[in-house]
Amino acid sequence: MWEVRKTRVSKPILAIETPIGHKLVLNILFGAAHTTDSTPVPDAVRGAILLQTRLRSGTAVVVLGRVLPFSDGDNVVMRRLRDDLGLRVNTDGPVSSGGVELFHVSASPTAGNVITVVPLGPEAWAAPSCP
């Protein structure tokens, strides 16, 4: 499921395939001053370790990821963004077979910082008519 891909930039990227009907959940943990590379990840945080590094300041950082099915709440947010708001994507030309994604950012004390990526299908694409 996890795949490292080389890019034009100096560092490779990690591509994570997320099946239809599922979401990718990432937790970014910043260590306290006394955190070492052997400090275990708290039991309350679940997921595979995708990246373990240190910032220039010396702060330890661990990124954990997991793929979960959409919850009822996720479906409500996506339905609202797709249907209730009547979102449309305008393009300068015909749309290729690639997808279009909408990003919705929210934050709360209980859920944390959440970025919802909503895929929009052809029903939301608006392109000028081509003769």
Image (cartoon, rainbow, N blue to C red):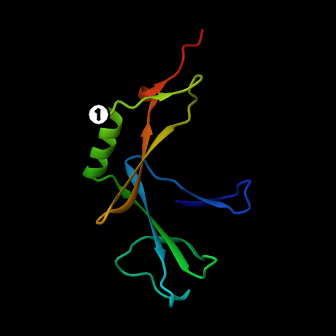
Where is residue 82 shown, x and y percent of the image?
Answer: 35, 36
In which quadrant of the rendered image does the C terminus lie?
top right
Residue at 43% in and 70% down: 47
- Figure check: 74 above or below 119: below
- Figure check: 69 above or below 37: above
Residue at 43% in and 36% down: 120
Residue where numbered disc 1 is placed: 84
Residue extending furthest toward the bottom: 34
Where is residue 22 shown, x and y percent of the image?
Answer: 39, 52
- Which quadrant of the view contains residue 98? top right
What's the amino acid at mark 1? Asp
Q: In screen coordinates, is 14 left or right of 19? A: right
Residue at 56% in and 86% down: 37
- Which quadrant of the view contains residue 55? bottom right
User: Between residues 121 and 106, which one lies in front from this camera angle?
Assistant: 106
- Figure check: 49 above or below 118: below
Residue at 56% in and 80% down: 59
Q: What element carries label 1?
A: helix
- Which quadrant of the view contains residue 5? bottom right
